[in-house]
Image: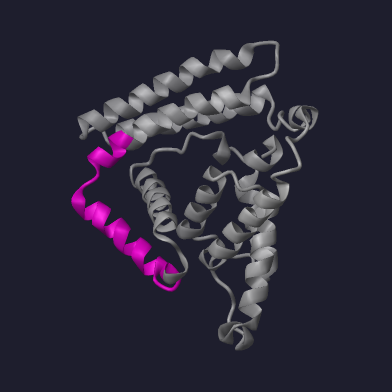
Amino acid sequence: MTGLNYYNYFTEIEEYFWKKRGAHLLVSPLDWAILETWQRAEIPVGTVMRGIDRAFESYARSRRGQSGRQLKSLAYCVDAVLETAEEEKEAAAGSGPSSSAARAGSDQSFSPAELKKYLQRNSEQLSRAAEKNRAAKSLAEALSAAKAKMAALLPLLDSPSAPDLEDLERRLTVIEEKLTAAISAAASDDLLVAIRRELDRQLAPYRRKMTAAQLSQLERSYSQKRLFEEFGAPRLSLFYLS
């Protein structure tokens, strides 16, 4: 996946979906979780778009589509996107690796100044989240530790050479994974049940279209997103910079 596609994944697919359904509506938390599962599976943006096209064509032939009802969620597109990804993977199996020069040309999606601003903004949000959750001592300490680790990354961006985005992303992922564990431990059973209920409610029309593995991945992504929102913590991956 090219740097451009990876780091603009949300916005490119979101805008394409808006155009396909003809309405500039807010993408739901469920849709964002679906996007994240596709990104983690390294499905390229172009492949997702072709899968969305296929899903819209199928929907137009369905009873709901012919009645004029609008396709409302990316959940309807899950099967079509995964089928398209599998077909394209098989078709490309004998084509050999992509050009390293092409990968290098697409690697610089953000300037050091943009990256610094992003890390600093997340550090400030982590500080606010630590203050907000100071009554939960272990969580507040985890949020403060994450902030300190973010600050330690800033000198990496002062190098005269171009920043290594892949290494920076790996470091951010490690910080976020530890923070996820701390937030999950701090969440009450009532909150976890409430999040699960709202996911089940949104997934109800689409659950039969998904495999157990797809549902499990989606549940993890959705729960993580909602927990971070509830505790005021920022997502740290460069995936969220755009």
Horizontal relation, residue 84 to residue 217: left or right: right
- Residue closer to the observer: 57 or 110: 57
Percent across and percent down for residue 104 are 75, 27
> Residue at the spot x=38%, y=53% of the render?
216
- Residue closer to the observer: 119 or 175: 175
The quarter holding residue 80 reads bottom right
| Residue 228 drawn above or below residue 109 | below
The quarter holding residue 72 reads bottom right
The quarter holding residue 2 reads top right
Q: Which residues are magenta?
A: 181-207
* 167 inside magenta stretch: no
Which residue is outermost to the top?
Answer: 160
Q: Is residue 31 visible?
A: yes
> Residue at the spot x=38%, y=29% of the render?
127
Horizontal relation, residue 82 to residue 101: left or right: left
Mainly helix, strand or loop, the magenta region? helix
* 197 inside magenta stretch: yes
> Residue at the spot x=61%, y=77% of the render?
59
Percent across and percent down for residue 5 are 68, 42
- Residue closer to the observer: 144 or 83: 83
Percent across and percent down for residue 148 are 40, 19
| Residue 41 drawn above or below residue 82 | above
Percent across and percent down for residue 100 are 76, 28
Q: Is residue 132 visible?
A: no
Is the C terminus in the top left, top right, bottom left or bottom right quadrant? Answer: top right
- Residue closer to the observer: 58 or 134: 58
